[in-house]
Image (cartoon, grey):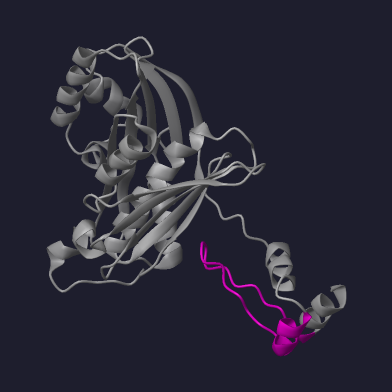
Amino acid sequence: MMNKDYILRGMAFDEHFRVFAVQNTAAVQKARDLHDLSPIATLLLGRLLSAAAMMSWDLKNPKAEITLRVDGEGLLQGAVAICTAAGKLRGYAHNPSLFLDEPKDNFLTGKYLGKGTITTIRNDAVKTPYSGTCQLVSGEIAEDLAEYYLQSEQIPTAVNLGILIDKEATIRAAGGFIIQQLPFADELEAEQLRVNIQATPNVSDLMDMGYTIKDILDKFVFKGIPWQQTDEREIEFSCTCTRERFANALMLLGKEELSTMVDGIEPVCHYCNTTYTFNHNDMINLIKQL
């Protein structure tokens, strides 16, 4: 599945560890292009998209979705990524056009997020959404997400998120993996995994060389370790917005508020930058429906 974005899951060490992995170069490229993201905003949103894609596998309801949000006090401000149970990704950066004078600074997401939080919101579409928040550890997202799992769910977790972007704003590679230690895992097994992960080159560099994310798991992360892939499915950057949804949202404003917009409005979707035009007649019809 080289030309497609996909996520996979599996088990290692006789089901003592859960494994999730993602290859989503095309989705990150689409997000970068839709929002005209700067390099540092691309890195932040791209990592969140990778993580949200992997986290979506635990969703049971077909209408459910997972939201991963980072908010920081620094210039970068943060970003939001959402993935549905069907593998539809969307997201946006709070400060998409942040360019820094020092070239190397454009790759230091943690430095320009500053103090902040990482939040997950699990919406199962049948009950009140569950959310959890953790203070940012580094702002590099992988470490922050690992700390979130440890604090909020008491699950020792290894997270690796890689993105490679060139000077022409082309995403050369994007992907990563999440490995979670289950309660009955052996400490020697965990140590062997730690050694392998530390010895694994940058995931995005390996992908740029032609390795798939599964190749990387086979040849590096689980070298000498028994593991098996159990499932695989495609993902894509695909917004869930529609004109009907915007119309329904407008009607929630009520007649009085809508009456101030009778000349027409053009709301823009945060997630995909699509503009929806509601002219004078459209606004009158919405008011009549109320």
Nearest to the observer: residue 51 or residue 133: 133
Instruction: Please name whichever residue, 198 or 255, is drawn nearer the observer in this view of the structure.
Output: 255
Asked whether residue 275 appears in the rendered view, the answer is yes
Residue 4 visible, this orientation: no
User: Farthest right residue?
Assistant: 288
x then y, percent, for residue 162: 27, 44
Relative to 41, 199 lies left or right: left
Q: Start and end of the magenta stretch?
A: 255-280
Residue 281: where, in percent of width, then height?
81, 83
Q: In which quarter of the image is the C terminus?
A: bottom right
Q: Is residue 211 depicted above or below 267 in this figure? A: above
Q: Foreground: 89 or 112?
A: 112
Q: Residue at x 50, y 33 (%)?
A: 57
Place of residue 69 in the rendered image (x, y in percent of width and height, measured from the top left): 41, 54
Dominant SS in magenta = loop
In the visual, does 228 lie left or right of 75? right
Which of the 4 image quadrants contains residue 200? top left
Q: Which residue is drawn at 21% across and 21% down?
A: 193
Of the pair 65 and 42, the residue shown nearer to us: 65
Q: In this view, does 167 lie above or below 206?
A: below
Q: Is residue 44 left or right of residue 289?
A: left
Q: Which residue is painted at 33% across and 34% down in the image?
A: 177
Is 2 contained in the magenta span?
Answer: no
Quarter of the image with the N terminus is top left
Residue 164 position within the rendered picture, expressed as x and y whole percent measured from the top left: 25, 49
